Amino acid sequence: MIAGILLCAGSAARMGFDKLLTPLCGRTAVERSAALLVQGGCKTLVLVGNESNEATLAALDVGVPKTVVRGGKTRTESVQSGLNALPDGGIVVIHDAARCFTPAECVAASIASARQYGSGVLALPIHDTVVRTDGADYETLDRSGLFATQTPQTFRTDEIRRAYALADGGATDDAALYARHIGTPRLVPGSELARKLTTAADWEWAKKLCNTYPKIGTGFDTHRLVEGRKLILGGVEIPYEKGLLGHSDADVLIHAIIDAILGAAALGDIGKLFPDTDGAYRGVDSRVLLRRAADMVQKRDMTVRHVDATVLCQRPKLRPYIDRMRENIAAELGLAAESVSVKATTTEGMNDEGRGLCISAQAIALVLGAADAAKL
Ligand code: MG
């Protein structure tokens, strides 16, 4: 049996908020860490929590059988609580929940090493020059043979349990106790991605890391051209004998762009979010809706990065207004105008656009967000 112990008992003192249970691009560190342990090969999990988070941990679906236990004041005590919840025999993967981007392959490699050699501890060689100084003495350490250990740290359950039973003082990791009481831990290559989220800078790093996944959306809209209405495209009022019919200002270009953005974020469509049965949207400036759609995307930790659109319009000529449309749209999206492209085409007199019955627009948006749950 391969069991995982996920350490979630640490206090959030250094970060100022609960870093383990605050969603990061849609998923918490605990959820990510539980998922990577399962992907790496754990068949059961023990979540070691504290008084304030154990109810949340208990409600979590991790996809395999799990138990939740209360941790202690130190990491050593918390690991001990986790080990107490496991049956004899088998392999145990001990992991800090705050290292929530550790690749599942590293978990699998540590398990394989523990099967073969009794232990598998993630570690990275240190490439920086390391010094020891108290302000007066200054010693440059020989960095050959220096490693930074990470988690997971994987062992035969009975052996690491024996090491913990013999522990007389705290240790900063499991490998230290194993080395003291059982034998030399076997190192397996760690990963820069196994970085522990400790400081605000770590949190920013994590946000960047999980917001690089490109998401694409398309949008299309069409509105009837009628007399007695203003013609508004991309937030620009264009002098013309007709205008577009609609519940809002009928800005067909912005509507297509809103749908593209919502599509990239998989948040539905403009009709679902701003229904025309809602009087609040009568005659509304579509730029307001565009801003609102962008806000919704942002709230889910995604960022609109680029928009491209084509307006299908026989008359009037749109070229003189294109740059102002781009600037308007970019302003609502918090983008530079270079990241908003607007093009116009006639349809050579064909189709309803060509006959002057309507104006249509199509758009595509690039949004960056978190990778699929399965990919990260
Ligand atoms: Mg529309």
Image (tube, helix red, strand yellow):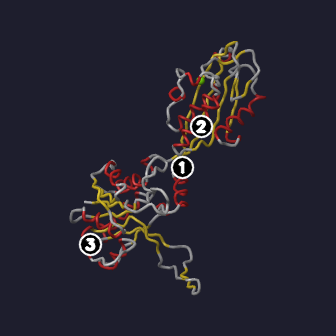
Quadrant where the N terminus is found in the figure = bottom left
Q: Which mark is residue 365?
A: 2
Is residue 82 shown above or below 165? above
Q: Is mark 1 within 8 Å of ligand 1?
A: no
User: Alpha carbon of mark 3 to alpha carbon of mark 2: how far?
Assistant: 54 Å
**Which of the two discs, 3 and 1, labels the residue nearer the N terminus?**
3
**Which of the two discs, 3 and 2, labels the residue nearer the N terminus?**
3
Side (left or right) of 243 relative to 30? right
**Which of the two discs, 1 and 2, labels the residue nearer the N terminus?**
1
Dividing the picture into quadrants, the one containing residue 359 is top right
Residue 72: percent from left, percent from top: 33, 66
Q: Disc 1, disc 2: CB below 8 Å?
A: no
Is residue 314 shown above or below 211? above
Dividing the picture into quadrants, the one containing residue 9 is bottom left
Please tell me how crowded label 2 is: few (under 14), some (14-19), or many (20+) other residues with Cα within 10 Å. Answer: many
SS for callout 2? strand
Q: Which mark is residue 159?
A: 3
Residue 257: percent from left, percent from top: 61, 32
Q: Disc 3, disc 1: CB below 8 Å?
A: no
Residue, far top: 227
Front in this rendered view, residue 118 or 254: 254
Q: Which mark is residue 211?
A: 1
* Residue occupying image coordinates x 27% and y 68%: 156
* Residue occupying image coordinates x 55% and y 56%: 204
